[in-house]
Amino acid sequence: MEYTPKKVFILEGKTYLELSYTEFRQQRVTYQGRRFISLHGMLMEVSEDAYKAFYKDKRRQKYLNERSDDNSDFSYDMLTTDEFNGEDILVDEAADTAGEAEKNLLLDKLHMLRRGERRIRERKDKEDDL
């Protein structure tokens, strides 16, 4: 262990018993085989499942950090201050898709109107020929 915990919490039934680390070390044989996790400078006894889940998550986070370091990942959130949002420096170069969709709908309507006008003219020409 890298540091000496301030307190140790032992699970007794459904409640926790608080011990100093010195008391815990003196009675370590009593607590041998039990599972403890380190939280905020203290040791806390937990169930086997909670212990495994805690260290599984801890190892997963370590793996993600290692991958992030390997890939030179960068978080724009780190640039956020009270006056500035770090994500604001990202500019979306993509076209305005909503605007493009609206434009395409209007062009389709225009083409339909022109086809309709053409049909009206063709009918009118046929009527004039009769």
Image (spheres, rainbow, N blue to C red):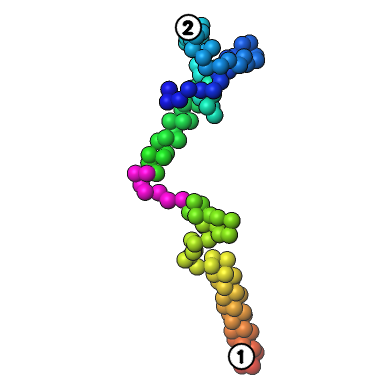
Quadrant including the C terminus: bottom right
Looking at the image, which residue is at 57% across and 69% down?
99
Question: Residue 94 in the image: x percent, y percent?
Answer: 48, 65
Residue that numbered label 1 is attached to: 125
Above/below status of 5 relative to 86: above
Above/below status of 68 relative to 91: above
The residue range painted magenta reads 69-75
Looking at the image, which residue is at 61% across and 16% down?
18
Question: Residue 78 in the image: x percent, y percent?
Answer: 49, 51
Looking at the image, which residue is at 48% across and 22% down?
4
Q: Front-most of 74 and 99?
A: 74
Given contact means CB atoms under 8 Å apart, are the residues at marks 2 and 1 in contact? no
- Of labels 2 and 1, the one closer to you: 2
Is residue 16 on the magenta stretch?
Answer: no
Is residue 74 on the magenta stretch?
Answer: yes
Q: Secondary structure at mark 1?
A: helix
Q: Secondary structure at mark 2?
A: loop
- On screen, residue 66 versus residue 91, left or right, reads left
C-alpha distance separating marks 2 and 1: 107 Å
- On screen, residue 17 versus residue 33, left or right, reads right
Label 1 sits on what residue type? Asp
Question: Residue 27 in the image: x percent, y percent?
Answer: 51, 8
Judged from this view, the residue extending furthest toward the left is 70
The numbered dot on residue 29 is 2
